[in-house]
Image: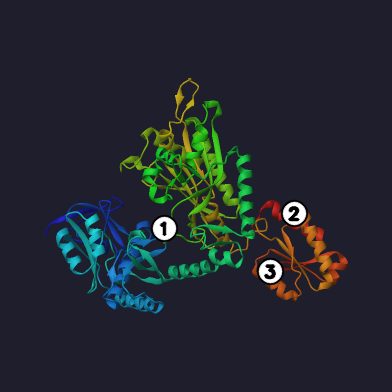
Amino acid sequence: MSEVIVTLPDGSQRPVAAGSTPLEVARAISPRLAQEAVAARLDGALADLTASITADTALEILTPKDPEALEVYRHSSAHLLAAAVLELFPETKLGIGPAVDNGFYYDFYRDTPFTAEDLEKIEAKMRELQARDLPFQRRTVPKAEGLARYAAMGEDLKCELIDEKAGETFSEYALGPRFVDFCRGPHLASTGRIKAFKLLSVAGAYWKGDERNRQGQRVYGTSFFTQKELDQHLQQLEEAKKRDHRKLGQELDLFSIQELAGPGLAFFHPKGATVRRLMEDWMRDQYVARGYSLVYTPHVARAGLWKTSGHYDFYADNMFARMELEDAEYQLKPMNCPFHILIYQDRLRSYRDLPIRLGELGTVYRYERSGVMHGLFRVRGFTQDDAHVFCTPGQIEDEVVYCLEFALAVLDTFGFERYEAELSTWDGGASGKYDGAPEEWALAEAALKNASRRLEMKVQLMPDEAAFYGPKIDVKLVDAIGRLWQLSTIQFDFTLPRRFGLEYIAEDGKAHRPLMVHRALFGSLERFFGILVEHYAGAFPVWLAPIQAIVLPITDKQLAYARQVHERLKAAGLRATVDDRPEKVNLKIREAQLQKIPYMLVVGGREAEAGTVSVRNRKHGDQGVKPLDAFLAEVGQLIAAKTPAE
């Protein structure tokens, strides 16, 4: 029998029989490695553990510690879900079933909606198929033959995908007696390797995310390598339900989405508007303190502006329909950057003027499809804390440092202790999808790397993940229950300065093109507001709380004193109110607690006589009787420090 040589990651080489599989090689190395194996990498390409090794190759066995392993595991879980559905409901037609963040889904098409009881049956069938340790069988199929077979099965959506994506041949995976899927893979060796999974929900989903297409049913699930990890995730999901900003937004009267006005358009009620105003005021103050010039720009512009910027051609599907007016077509703005460019371009700029930092809390409008809108996290009208920096090459590294310092200040001020950062690069431009000259990319990427080093920020390199118009750093916050949220972005742009012909006069007296950086730190105010609600479970820190203190008279005899206390609180700058209803004080306390008001000041006869207040904290309960001046001093320090603690 002929042999081939496999080269392992440590550089060692091992002869194996031609036709051996990565799983067999793993068994020969270590039974434990074989048991943990998820997939393989052959000469750098992901492959099944059951793939045949027919030539000398570099081999890496992927285990749960490898980043790609969980995606393979969850994609296999999606196939297990589909196989179970076809066993129970054979009339069902198939869509797609990818791994996604925190789990997987599969799209199904059938006339009868899935019920909660159906999900329980499907999950039970998945466990049955898992226990049978069925193999994931990969086959290579000629395109014409595969199309004919899928058409005969009535799988018209699969035929559409094969037409679009397949070459002369394609791969498919079979699992069990009924399920077969056009799929690139790889997958686990067998269902027995899926140890912990759970179906979560079902929702409507349009084919390819287009509401003009057929609507199916998307079943969501999640899976982990161990039951412990799954249990921890399910516990986090339960906590997330309690913190859902849509639920709390209604309970705390913070915001609403009004059906009459339209989906994806947020209305901030007085209490929510108070929190938003505090966010905006802090950001504008920071702009001024950090050398930004505040600007205001229109909500619409002639379509010609968007043609110059490129959005008219490349972003049209995400823009609202154009409006025909007497002099031209106009369009709602999907972003602020072309407007800031026009301000820069309005006059001749010298190197002595740079850097120019233009900042705006600008409202933009994007046509989000109905299936993707989600509370304040995905809306059609939102306000960005948008800023653009125009500078010389010699200034760029310092400017990136200033932007990153600003981003970290946002996290610190609003009570986020942990974050992760990613640096997306073009990886040399080998994919051919990028704009800009190599020297521009080299300068920009070096500035981002050096700036992160100067601030001792740990950043994960993301090769070939840059936007086509430049590299970027993304800062992702970690919230109170461990979830990761995309927040701040610092993004280079080589395209817009060229499209608009931006210039400045350099020291040599000649015109040069400035460097341009987009920078958004909240991202959008609406989304950041929603994150804050969920991070704090609606119990905002004192400095952000819509109502910071409520005065609770025990009886009507203390109303006059309660109102005096209220006036003192207001005079000290606190947002306060009085509950003067003729209700028992315990009911008032309970309702104030439900409204997550930080401080409840109970006043009875003794407090009125002594000029004191009995302080209750929403988190720590009874704080005892205090002179009003002492309470004001204590709370004033918390507000001034913007501390998340109480």
Q: Residue furthest top?
A: 509
Tell me: 575 left or right of 299: right
The location of residue 96, given as percent across then percent down, is 31, 63
Residue 63 seen anywhere in this rendered image of the structure: no
First in sequence: mark 3 or mark 2?
2
Furthest residue in direction left, as rendered? 1
Residue, disc 2:
573
- Amino acid tagged 2: Gly
Residue at 87%, 66% in the rendered image: 610
Amino acid type, mark 1: Arg
Of the numbered discs 3 and 1, the one sitting upstream in the chain is 1
Location of the N terminus (image quadrant): bottom left
Residue 374 point in image, percent of width and height: 47, 61
Q: Which mark is residue 369?
A: 1
Regarding mark 3 in the picture, which secondary structure is present there? helix
Residue mark closest to the camera, 1 vs 2: 1
Nearer to me, 97 or 625: 97
For residue 269, say whether it is visible.
Answer: yes
Q: Disc 3 versus disc 2: distance between alpha carbons? A: 20 Å
- In the rendered view, tell whether residue 214 sits above or below residue 492: below
Residue 592 is tagged as: 3
Find the distance from the CA under tag 1 to the CA under tag 2: 43 Å
Residue beneath the point at 36% across and 34% down? 437
